[in-house]
Image (tube, rainbow, N blue to C red):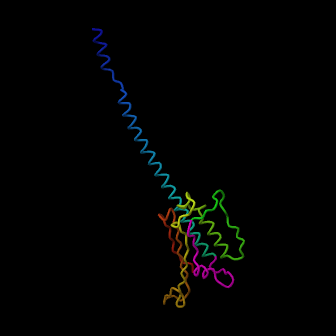
């Protein structure tokens, strides 16, 4: 009787076998892999969002710089007419040293040259990531450019019969992340 009671006691005890432990470990491991992938996706999304925020800020900076310096001159030419005739652009990511962020020194004697130096500095890969950051050459898809369109009654590239005053329209475009993300801002300067 005692032997039967011990046998009954052993079979009624529930425990975990090696097989059950391996299965539960595999299930928990699959859950952790899914969580790590979700964290990786979240970090990438935060990075993209940060780059979009920076490009929004920088395109707004371009518009504000044009508002501020629209009446400045370089020699006998107006700031706006120079940019309209020769649009500003950065075609590729530069290969500058990213250990220290270069600040423009504003040594030029006119607003146009100082602004071009500022824009080249601010739109370099030190501020906005480029798809060419990891390689030796820059990406040609990460373009930054500013176009100015002069609109007037007659004698301009863009004429409008209802325009009695000269109007300057700006278009700034920032392509980033290999051209996959683009920020475009249209604005009126005058």
Q: Please check the rendered image and state whether residue 128 is part of the magenta-colored stretch, yes or no.
A: no
x 53%, y 81%: residue: 149
Q: Position of residue 70 (x, y in %)?
A: 62, 79
Residue 75 lies in what quarter of the image? Answer: bottom right
* Residue at position x 72%, y 76% in the image: 109
* Closest to the observer, 143 or 158: 143
Q: Residue at x 62, y 68 (%)?
A: 120
Q: Total label count?
A: 0
User: On the image, which quarter does residue 168 sit in?
Assistant: bottom right
Q: Position of residue 35 (x, y in %)?
A: 44, 45
- Which quadrant does the N terminus fall into? top left
Q: Seen in the image, is 38 located left or right of residue 57?
A: left
Q: Is residue 126 above or below residue 173?
A: above
75 within the magenta span: yes
Looking at the picture, tell me which residue is in the foreground, 18 or 16: 18
- Quadrant where the C terminus sits is bottom right
Residue 153 in percent (x, y) is at 52, 90
Q: Residue furthest front?
A: 136
Residue closest to the eye, 130 or 118? 130
23 lies above or below 168: above
Residue 10 point in image, percent of width and height? 32, 17
Q: Residue 67 vs residue 19: left or right? A: right
Magenta span: 69-92
């Amino acid at each position: 009787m005692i032997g039967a009671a011990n046998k009954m006691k052993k079979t009624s005890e529930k425990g975990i076998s090696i097989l059950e432990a391996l299965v539960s470990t595999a299930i928990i491991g699959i859950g952790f892999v899914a969580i790590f992938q979700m964290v990786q996706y979240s970090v990438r999304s935060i990075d993209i969002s940060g780059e979009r925020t920076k490009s929004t800020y920088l395109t707004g900076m371009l518009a504000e710089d044009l508002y501020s310096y629209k009446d400045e001159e370089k020699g006998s030419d107006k700031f706006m007419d120079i940019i309209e005739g020769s649009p500003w652009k950065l075609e590729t990511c530069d290969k500058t040293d990213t250990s220290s962020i270069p600040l423009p020194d504003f040594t030029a004697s006119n607003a146009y040259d100082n602004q071009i130096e500022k824009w080249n500095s601010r739109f370099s890969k030190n501020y906005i990531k480029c798809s060419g950051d990891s390689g030796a050459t820059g990406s040609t898809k990460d373009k930054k450019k500013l176009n100015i369109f002069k609109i007037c009654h007659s004698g301009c590239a863009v004429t409008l019969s209802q325009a009695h005053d000269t109007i300057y329209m700006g278009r700034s475009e920032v392509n980033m992340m290999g051209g996959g993300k683009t920020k475009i801002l249209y604005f009126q300067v005058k």
